Amino acid sequence: MPDTITITDDRTGKTVTVPITDGVFPSSALRELDKNLFIYDPAFLSTAACRSAITYLDGDNGVLHYRGYPIEQLAEHSTYLEVAYLLLYGDLPNESQLKTWSYEVTHHTFIHENMRKRFVDGFHYDAHPMGMFISALGALGTFYNDAKNIFDAESRHKQILRLIAKAPTLAAMCHRFSVGLPFFLPDNSLSYPANFLNMMWKIGEYEVHPTLERAMDVLFILHADHEQNCGTTAMRVVASSNADPYSAAAAAAAALYGPLHGGANEAVVRMLTEIGTLDDVPAFVDDVKEGKGRLMGFGHRVYKNYDPRARIIKQTAYDVFEVTGKNPLLDIALKLEETALEDPYFVDRKLYPNVDFYSGLIYQALGFPVDMFTVLFAIPRMSGWLAHWDELLGDKDQKISRPRQWYAGPAERDYVKLGDR
Ligand code: ACO
């Protein structure tokens, strides 16, 4: 069987044959047929907008690899900083590379005093931390004019370090502001996740529990990248105009904020709280089937099987609950999962728990307010966004993102004066 596809334009009889490589054929085939012929593909269901060597995802079989490494192995053996290096530079660091990388990240964790005082103080007392975080990313870029030198490899490396290092600092700043607590400075003697937990919770005597530090690190690893999702696509689209990485990351974070994307972890906990008791689970599932809302934390554009991250998070949740005590919403979540996975509505549509179904329960057990959940997703996703940014800038096939449209408005008509309308 030839690995080609032949497309015939029945209007003209013109035919074009192009190769299919890894299940993909180039859209240049259409341009060859007729340069004004476009594919109508809302939400990019059948469009690959780039070639990427970062993350591999097989949604039918529930497989996720970062640079070829299965997510299960990374979650078990590595740290988030190792994974961030892997995503960005293509390979796991050796000992000396990891030492340098960790040192560099650790020594970029502080933010300018004006960010902490003047910038954050301008927010209303009940501002949502994710809204603050998105704004903080854009504002951070104004402190680094060298960020505009995006074709300078050294400058790119500097911005990567800054964004990865400062993301937890900004996140903790947003939280502390929203609860009226004084800001706590980064402690460079701590690991990446421990430093974050320390900045979040330090009041008087506080020591990060090693189990919780590891759980945070595992959650960071699981959220670090997920190929061309909505947020990463926003990052690439904005970066394709050669905008600086702070502006592009702010756009990516804004996309992540939505409840159909990274905002789902927040929506899951609200949903479980609303359900309230085990007895109310079947009625809730019936309502979803009747179209009254969605089962948040279920379903995925690409996974038509159990999200491998959800499986690892479920296990991590039990480790955390051993230290913090069980989250009372866990039983409702388990019952909901069991009910949905036995119901033909969900089975037929291949709707399984996604990464957000159990992550909120851990975040809540760790003491994070629900409003912080999407911020917790954004911290590690920064390394994925930046890996895609770097890849995009080195990709000769890329140009400024500019899709076509299928115009559906009125045909040309003459202007009607105000008095004649
Ligand atoms: N609950 C109930 N029904 C659902 C759900 C759900 N969570 N998800 C999809 N469906 C149904 C749809 O109603 C549709 O049914 P139909 O064929 O009878 O019309 C069918 O399954 C296909 O759904 P689509 O919306 O076409 O799937 P799409 O790929 O566009 O959406 C999405 C994927 C947005 C994740 C969706 O499953 C959803 O809304 N899930 C809940 C929100 C969520 O958990 N988001 C987090 C995703 S993971 C992440 O972004 C980190």
Image (cartoon, rainbow, N blue to C red):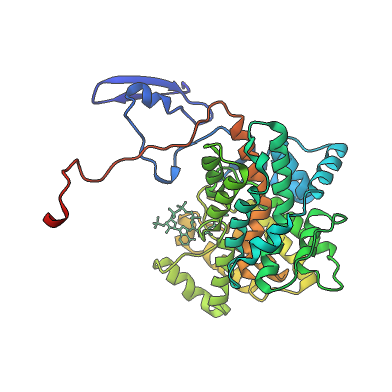
Nearest the eye: 285 or 328 = 328
Nearest the eye: 48 or 396 = 396
Q: Is residue 249 left or right of residue 295?
A: right
At 73% across and 40% down in the image, what residue appears? 158
Q: Residue furthest left?
A: 420
At 65% across and 45% down in the image, what residue appears? 384
Q: Is residue 231 left or right of residue 197?
A: left
Q: Quadrant of the C terminus?
A: bottom left
Q: Image quarter for residue 363?
A: bottom right
* As drawn, 237 above or below 255: above
Nearest the eye: 9 or 406 = 406
Q: Pinpoint residue 205: horizontal percent, then vertical percent.
A: 87, 73
At 55% across and 58% down in the image, what residue appears? 257
Q: Image quarter for residue 68?
A: top right
Q: Image quarter for residue 317?
A: bottom right
Q: Pinpoint residue 323: horizontal percent, then vertical percent.
A: 80, 70
Nearest the eye: 10 or 90 = 90
Q: Is residue 149 visible?
A: yes
At 64% across and 56% down in the image, what residue appears? 377
Q: Pinpoint residue 311: horizontal percent, then vertical percent.
A: 66, 56
Q: Pinpoint residue 276: horizontal percent, then vertical percent.
A: 56, 79
Count of numbered tags: 0
Q: Is residue 55 visible?
A: no
